[in-house]
Amino acid sequence: MPRYKLSPEERAAEKARKEQLLALLSTLNVTKVEDFQGLYKDMVGAFLESELEAELEDELTVLKRPITAATAIARRALRPRTGSWNSKFRPNFHPNPSKNRI
């Protein structure tokens, strides 16, 4: 049974990756956990911002497409219903279940 789960090539790649990370951390003057937390927060913030901008751009691209009859029907079906409700359409719900009208 082999002693290592990783092959020698995978172990060498993992060692090189760790050395690169340590070099990056020393370049960025990360000496304390607080420094790393701040760096991590900045990295995640930048990543989320770029992803949200890309998603917004995709949505705007979708909205710019010409509307076909099928798309209009689908949008109408997904649109929340608005307007005034008559009393006969309001649900008869009371927080006390014994007072609910059926």
Image: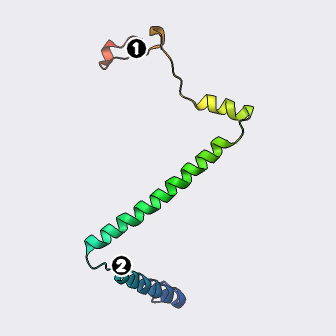
Q: Quadrant of the C terminus?
A: top left
Q: Mark 1 points at which residue?
A: 92
Q: Distance between the residues labelled 1 and 2?
A: 63 Å
Residue at screen point 48% across, 14% down = 84
The answer to whether mark 1 and mark 2 are in CB contact below 8 A is: no
**Three-letter amino acid code at disc 2?**
Leu
Residue at screen point 55% across, 55% down = 54
Regarding residue 92, the answer to whether it shows in the image is yes
Q: Name the residue under label 2.
A: 28
Regarding residue 1, the answer to whether it shows in the image is no
The picture quadrant where one finds residue 28 is bottom left
Indicate the position of residue 3 as horizontal and vertical percent values: 45, 89
Colour logic: rainbow
* 48 relative position to 60: left or right: left
**Three-letter amino acid code at disc 1?**
Asn
The picture quadrant where one finds residue 60 is top right
Pointer 2 local density, CA inside 10 Å: few below 14, some 14–19, many at least 20:
few
Q: Is mark 2 on a helix, strand or loop?
A: loop
| Above or below 49: residue 13 | below
Residue at screen point 54% across, 89% down = 9
Query: Any mark on residue 19, and which?
Result: none
Closer to us: mark 1 or mark 2?
Answer: 2
Pointer 1 local density, CA inside 10 Å: few below 14, some 14–19, many at least 20:
few
Residue at screen point 31% across, 68% down = 37
The picture quadrant where one finds residue 42 is bottom left
| Above or below 87: residue 51 | below
Indicate the position of residue 75 as horizontal and vertical percent values: 63, 32
Q: Earlier in the sequence, mark 1 or mark 2?
A: 2
Q: What element carries label 1?
A: loop
